[in-house]
Amino acid sequence: MDDAAIIGAGPVGLALAIELAQSGHAVRVFEQRSEPVAHSRAIGLHPPAQEVLARLGVGPAVQRSGVQIRGGLGISRGRSIASMDFSTIGGRYPYVLSLPQQDTEQLLRERLEQLAPGSLMMDCAFEQVLGQSEQAVEFAAGGVVHRARWLAGADGVRSAVRTDLGVGFAGREHRDRYLMGDFPETTGLAHTAALFLHQQGIVESFPLPGARRRWVVRIEQMQVDDSPGMLAQTILDRTGYLLDAEACTMTSNFGTATRMVPSMVHGRVVLLGDAAHQISPIGGQGLSLGLADAQAVAHLIAARAPMGALDNRRLGAARSAARRAQVNMLLGRALPRWAVPLRDSAMSRLASSAWLQGKVARDFTMTGRGQRSVPVA
């Protein structure tokens, strides 16, 4: 019998498996896909996430593969109105690391294969929980019955585990919608994230590995043209940067929502990552939040400790992240023309405060009080 069976081979499920395998526990990961996903929206690894990945033994490889985001600029009407310097947060990782999620997953898969060869089962979908006792849970996956001490659902927003358990996922859709794409780096912004606060809606820009840059544009709900050409034209109109639409390697049109389970723990089944909490991807906190979940769950399983503390700490962290994400979305919404100078003036005054600059930098990097990923005791 495995100590933990994990549904979902995304970064959260893989991180949980590796953390447990490193401490000698028998693990098995079930993934319904037959092949890894080629593209992903998630790129940001905040300092707490980098700490988790270092603990998992992939830290050096992640650092070699990623690009450091060392600060940010707020730009409106062609001039900088606010800036952030992440070096002020201190610590081992005074930056956000930009690395596409599929690359992070590849490094984690390789690490898991080193620790527990053959433990990742691709093309093997979870079907249902068959029963639980005080010592184990029995479930079906891939047409076979399995038993484990714990079953972890790390299978994303549309979690089959959560659905099978009948666990609620209360929340709401937001009216904010975005179009993003990856283009060659032509801005000269280097290691800086840029937020272009245009009257018609925000444009965000982040460095990527391989001399590329990600662009995220707020769009109208009813916009149907999500072609690279439309994205490049919108970026030109709002920022002045001319991008080569033919060189765009991916686009994604996505909405936003906030949802949360009432509890992460259901007998000997635990939900984590997006299966437990969905927040807006604006601000890039979701992946870091899920990796912190994995660390906390692994600690409790390894210590044979009660899971009772999980909800208070991890769902509390998710609620805080959701509030920050909603502030980020509000900042990026369209404004009446008359309101833009008022917004810019207010932001410039606020940015002149060293204390506030530091607080914003800590919030942006998820290093503020109570945000760092630490084990749940």
Image: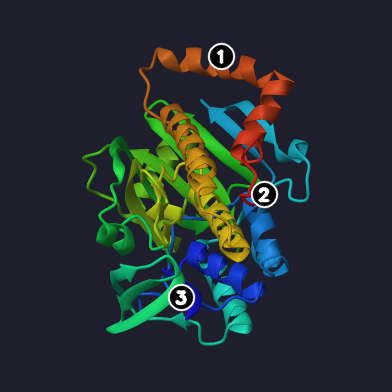
- To which quarter of the image does residue 138 belong? bottom left
Q: CA distance from mark 2 to mark 3?
A: 26 Å
Horizontal side of 117 relative to 41 (left or right) equals right
User: Nearer the viewer's eye, disc 2 or disc 3?
Assistant: 3
The label on residue 87 is none
Mark toward the start of the polypeptide (1 vs 3):
3
* 71 vs 245: above or below: above
For the point 74% across and 50% down, which residue is it? 93
Q: Position of residue 305 (x, y in %)?
A: 58, 57
**Residue at the location (66% across, 56% down)?**
50
Q: Nearer the viewer, residue 149 or 249?
A: 149
Q: Is residue 129 depicted above or below 197 in this figure?
A: below
* Residue 24, percent from left and from top: 64, 77
Residues tagged 1 and 3 counted as in contact (Cβ below 8 A): no
Provide the residue designation for mark 2.
47
Earlier in the chain: of badge 2 and badge 3, it is 3
Amino acid beneath label 1: Ser
Q: Residues within 10 Å of mark 3 (few under 14, many from 20)?
A: many
Instruction: Determine the CA span between mark 1 and mark 3.
Output: 52 Å
Label 3 sits on residue: 29
Task: Give the residue at mark 1.
Answer: 345
